[in-house]
Amino acid sequence: MTILGGARIDVPGIRRRLTTCPAGRLGWQEYENVGVQALTYLLVPPLSRPQVQAKTLSGIDRRDAIFPNRITDSRSPWGLLYQELKARLILVEFKNYDRIEIGKDEVDQTRNYMKTAMGRLAIVCCNKLPSDAALRRRNIVFSDEGKVILFLTTSHLLEMIDMKERGEDPSEFIIDSYETFLIQHE
């Protein structure tokens, strides 16, 4: 059990729930809930606590989670992302699919949720690897709009938890994912 901001975080419970959450409709809400808990444990601080199910004024768009980033010092991972991508508000979408693949439609949905004032960084947490179509669409979005959409699978979240437990900064995993994306982009 870990204490974070006065709240107890059951890290073994988060691990267990991430690995046992049923794919598809049956587990979508559980996957989102445990994903928010995991990312809060991993990234808060330095990021601020997320706004969950944040809606636009009209109520048309509802984002799964948004983590405010108030770090501007480019010597830190989140400050670097703030400087390079204007990543003021980090959008996180959760996809816990069963038979359906994580495809270009999921990339477009995330892209559409990314408004200019938020910045150009979003994360899609998913229970399986995205399809080639999703990766190609993500490249097009970056080429056309400069928006970066990173994919974090359940195994990535577990790896980040391992990093934190070893005393490492799990934000470095985000930076590594961003740099890998830049290297592989075509």
Image (cartoon, grey):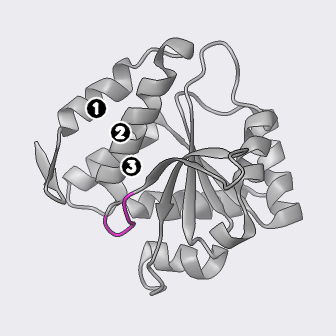
In the displayed structure image, the side of residue 137 where residue 50 appears, left or right: left
Alpha carbon of mark 3 to alpha carbon of mark 2: how far?
Answer: 10 Å
Disc 1: CA contacts within 10 A as few (<14), some (14-19) or many (>=20)? some
Residue 46, position as x, y percentages in the image: 34, 70
User: Magenta stretch mostly in which secondary structure?
Assistant: loop
Query: Is residue 55 located in the magenta-colored stretch of the structure?
Result: no
Residue 158's disc number:
2
Disc 3: CA contacts within 10 A as few (<14), some (14-19) or many (>=20)? many
Mark 3 = which residue? Answer: 39
Q: Are marks 3 and 2 in contact (CB under 8 Å)?
A: no
Q: Are marks 1 and 2 in contact (CB under 8 Å)?
A: yes
Q: SS class of the residue under badge 2?
A: helix
Q: Could one spot residue 186 in this view of the protein?
A: no
Mark 1 = which residue? Answer: 15
Q: Could one spot residue 125 in this view of the protein?
A: yes
The total number of labels drawn is 3
Q: Is residue 151 above or below residue 49?
A: above
Residue 73, position as x, y percentages in the image: 45, 87
Q: SS class of the residue under badge 3?
A: helix
Residue type highlighted by circle 1: Arg
Residue drawn at point x = 67 percent, y = 33 percent: 130
Residue drawn at point x = 66 percent, y = 12 percent: 99
The magenta region covers 45-49
Point out the tag, 1 or 2, that comes first from the N-terminus: 1
